[in-house]
Amino acid sequence: MRRILEEARNFAASDAPMLIVGETGTGKNLLAQAIHNAGPRRKCPFCEINCGGISETLQESELFGHRKGAYTGADSDREGVLQTARGGTLFLNEIGDISLSAQKRLLDVVEYRKYRKLGDDKEIETDVRIIAATNVDIEGLRQKGAFRDDFYFRLACLKVELPPLRKRREDVPTLVDRFLEEFSELEKKPAAGVEPDAMGELVEYDWPGNVRQLRFVVWHALLQAKGGKIAREHVLKATGLDEARKDAQNLEPLEEVEKKYILKALTVTNWNKSRTAQILKLSRPALDRKIQAYNLARR
Ligand SMILES: Nc1ncnc2c1ncn2[C@@H]1O[C@H](COP(=O)(O)OP(=O)(O)O)[C@@H](O)[C@H]1O
Ligand SMILES: [Mg+2]
């Protein structure tokens, strides 16, 4: 993570658009904010717009603003976030969900620093730095024609990839210390460290939710820990691994499952073997072999 931050710091002074790629919870928001804070725009706003889950009209209206009556429901003038973020940074989150038409307009903003509100002819000058983030593969969207090449190449010129936590496990102990400090302060509960086997579980875990998940697991574990010392059982509980492992122990051998299933089918058909074979998509001789192998008998 330090190496990535070092590299990203070189981009902070630039006005070039930037793209942050990484799974959910890897720190994309955090990095975007850090880049803003480290650059010359830090005294001006950092505005985020989430392109996911909002309609194409709303995307454009939020970005560029609109004049009253520009579309149904636009019942007053509205300032876009491009205006609000003037002088600062515009963070386009979930950029993979942005419409093609908004991409075209944003490309013009990057190239000419000008745009128009929806339903308005007047050109407005703007000055923002664009940082975009995504957890989907934009390269793939581009090949499908769902993302403009020209906009992609502008964005991807400065590209930072945040690796998933399971690919940088050496970061886990540092992050754990950091979050323990945070939550022991919040909970007014002194932390007394992490047992080695508990740390072992934390390092080994797969972290589908990445750093965000680790943060909550540390919190959960601290709340359980008597005397503030985090033990292995607290970690297993907080990650849900205890349940998963219990389930794994309860799993039966496949043969056992097959045996029960065949018996069930035979019972349902009242031991009509032809019918059972048909249901199970087995040949009659194959069914007979299994009945023999599993020693199945009619009760
Ligand atoms: N390197 C890091 N150091 C400390 N906290 C981090 C780090 N990376 C992520 N976090 C924390 O993890 C959580 C998720 O980060 P966030 O930037 O929202 O991820 P994303 O936007 O990729 O989903 C936040 O609480 C953030 O503060
Ligand atoms: Mg985020």
Image: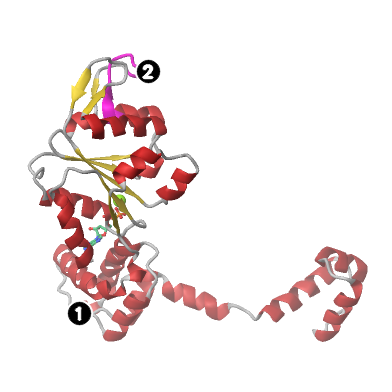
Query: In the image, is 143 to the left or to the right of 32?
Result: right
**What secondary structure predominates along the stretch shown in magenta?**
loop
**Amino acid beneath label 2:** Tyr
- Secondary structure, mark 2, is loop
Is residue 297 in the magenta section? no
Q: Quadrant of residue 237?
A: bottom left
**Percent coordinates x, y for residue 93 in the rendering:** 31, 44
Q: Is residue 253 visible?
A: yes
| Residue drawn where x is 46% and y is 49% of the image | 140
**Amino acid beneath label 1:** Gly
Indicate which disc, 2 or 1, sits on the residue closer to the N terminus.
2
Q: Nearer the viewer, residue 207 or 183?
A: 207
| Residue drawn where x is 17% and y is 65% of the image | 182
- Count of all numbered marks drawn on residues in the image: 2
| Residue drawn where x is 33% and y is 19% of the image | 74
With respect to residue 37, does 129 lie above or below? above
Q: Which residue is mark 1?
A: 193
Quadrant of the snapshot with the C terminus: bottom right
Query: In the image, is 194 to the left or to the right of 205?
Result: left
**Percent coordinates x, y for residue 189 in the rendering:** 16, 70
**Percent coordinates x, y for residue 121 in the rendering:** 27, 14
Q: Nearer the viewer, residue 99 or 24?
A: 99
Q: Which residue is mark 2?
A: 71
Magenta residues (range): 62-74
Is residue 65 in the magenta section? yes
User: In the rendering, which numbered label is found on residue 202?
Assistant: none
Circle 2/circle 1 CB separation < 8 Å: no
Q: Quadrant of residue 242?
A: bottom left
Task: Point out the frontmost of discs 2 and 1.
Answer: 2
Q: Is residue 93 visible?
A: no
- Secondary structure, mark 1, is loop
**Percent coordinates x, y for residue 247 in the rendering:** 53, 75
